Amino acid sequence: MSATGITYYDRPVLKEPVWIWTVPAYIFVGGVAGAAMTLGLAVELIGGSRLRAFDERCRWIGAVGGGIGSALLIADLGRKSRFFAMLRVLRPSSPMSIGSWVLATATPLSAGSALLTLQRDGVLRAAGQLAGASAGILGMPLATYTAVLLGNSAVPLWLITRNTMPLLFGASSAASLGSVFDLMRLNREEQSIATRFQLVGRVAELAAAEAVERQACSNERVGRPLREGVSGAIWQAAKVLNVASLVLTIMPGNSKMRRRIAGVCGILGGIAVRFAIFHAGKASTRDPRATFEQQR
Amino acid sequence: MPTGFFTDTTLCIGCKACEVACKQWNQLPSDGYNFTGMSYDNTVQLDASTWRHVAFVERPAPVSEQPVNSFSWLMLSDVCKHCNRAGCLENCPTGAIIRTEFDSVFVQPDICNGCGYCVVGCPFGVIDRNPTDGLAWKCTLCYDRQKAHMEPACAKACPTDSIQFGEIADLRTKAAARIEQLHGQGVSAAYLYGADEASQPGTEGLNAFFLLVDRPETYNLPPNPVAPAKRAGPSWASMAVTSLGLLAAAFGAVASVRGGRR
């Protein structure tokens, strides 16, 4: 028998992650919220007074996304009533601990800034702008830490892609935020900003997805779930949806309907990226050979 | 004083007394009467309510160079390894998982909120979330018994001393002597798994280490387990670069549109 062929009655070595669908859903929603906070920071600092409404919209997306994201995470806990234990300590070795603090800080800051900047001027408005800027800084890790969280594990597929996944999640967050804007009524200037932000994100997302797949498939056994089965199908669907969204966005002309369809494709593509990575990771833990071959 | 287990698999007779003693002392529920059809192993794995698991390997090869038989039984009583760099502990966001005064890794059930991050952090697939109460559970190295100066239930019940409990330094000495003895008897394949940092840098050594006579994979042990946080550095760096890229894209998008308008 070959060295890598040995298993214990084909039983998995690792435990399959116990997380449910709310976790990849959170990775998407939290990513969009984080990207919105960061875009809000740029709009606040260099956007000028004409873009105030857009700034506010970014903050609301950040606050609502952070709120929904928190609810999705709590829904996954084994003991939901103890969600507050997440803020009991700050553990630098745990990306989940750091992420909990980021989420729990950025969300109220974003909501606070949206409320306070309703004031035209004065101390409260200044405080709101400061809160918005702080949320904008925290939005960057919020959109990307989830990739470090997954990679910081024994799950073969997440482990092998831990260096490219942050790029995928960050880029996908920017692209998905742009798609969310595609479903909103924006003025011309706001729409150009959203579209440019989206395009940069989408191109980076497609490139990062390629990098993730290559890294995963550098070990045939580990990368298999991205090519086969349900997770492989979701991964392919994600690529098709994202390419479709990109093509629809860069097509010349100004059709509202086309913009809406591009938005829906982009959002579904962003969600599919997270679910594909999530389920492919789960599948890789069920295969003892993936675990062994990665370590030999 | 660090204490732990030295599990000598060459002495294991597969009686499962350790499994029973563990279940009884820790008041863990039954796994049900399941018949797996794979050897004598109907326990299958360590999980939230099974903290000792005897693996049975039927191997079509002799255990030593003595050509008396072309078949050998390998049995291993598996348990939480209480790693010196413990993936579960480092991943735990609530501080529920702690290192005790005995150097063991212990989950505080009154703090755990069942986030499940320890489950993916363990490179051995030991710790698990109990679907009934939603909390993470694993071997405590009989923290309560140790507090009362008693040895863990499994070691106490083991009739062949395959499971030895004691201070880590003593166990290492005993284990080294046992290896020498086995090598002298012709069991040249005998080696220690996870006895120290040098042989298993990924975990920096196990407080529950093993004497094996075949590849780790044979017993469903990972050949090179690593605590995830040990190699998370580049991942954090990649996140930092991506974050800055996100910021640049945001400013670039706003600036390019604003600039075009002027």
Image (cartoon, rainbow, N blue to C red):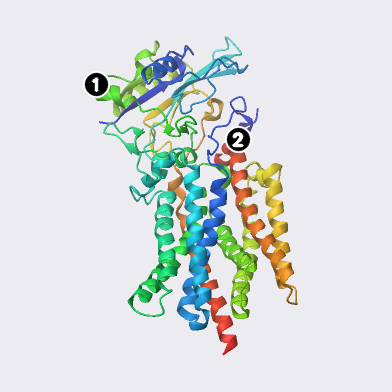
Q: Is residue A194 left or right of residue A94?
A: right
Residue B137 lies, in percent from the top left, at 42, 31
Residue A259 lies, in percent from the top left, at 70, 69
Q: What is the quadrant of the N terminus of chain A in the image?
A: top right
- Which residue in the structure is indicated by mark 2? A286
Q: Is residue A238 left or right of residue A50?
A: right
How many marks on residues?
A: 2
Front residue of this view, candidates A72 and A133: A72
Residue B15 lies, in percent from the top left, at 47, 11
Label 2's element? loop
Q: Residues within 10 Å of mark 1 (few under 14, many from 20)?
A: few
Q: Are marks 1 and 2 on the same chain?
A: no
- Which residue in the structure is indicated by mark 1? B149
Front residue of this view, candidates A112 and A2: A112
User: Which residue type does callout 2 highlight?
Assistant: Arg
Determine the residue located farthest toward the front in the rendered image.
A119
Q: Quadrant of residue B155?
A: top left
Q: Residues within 10 Å of mark 2 (few under 14, many from 20)?
A: many
User: Which residue type does callout 1 highlight?
Assistant: His
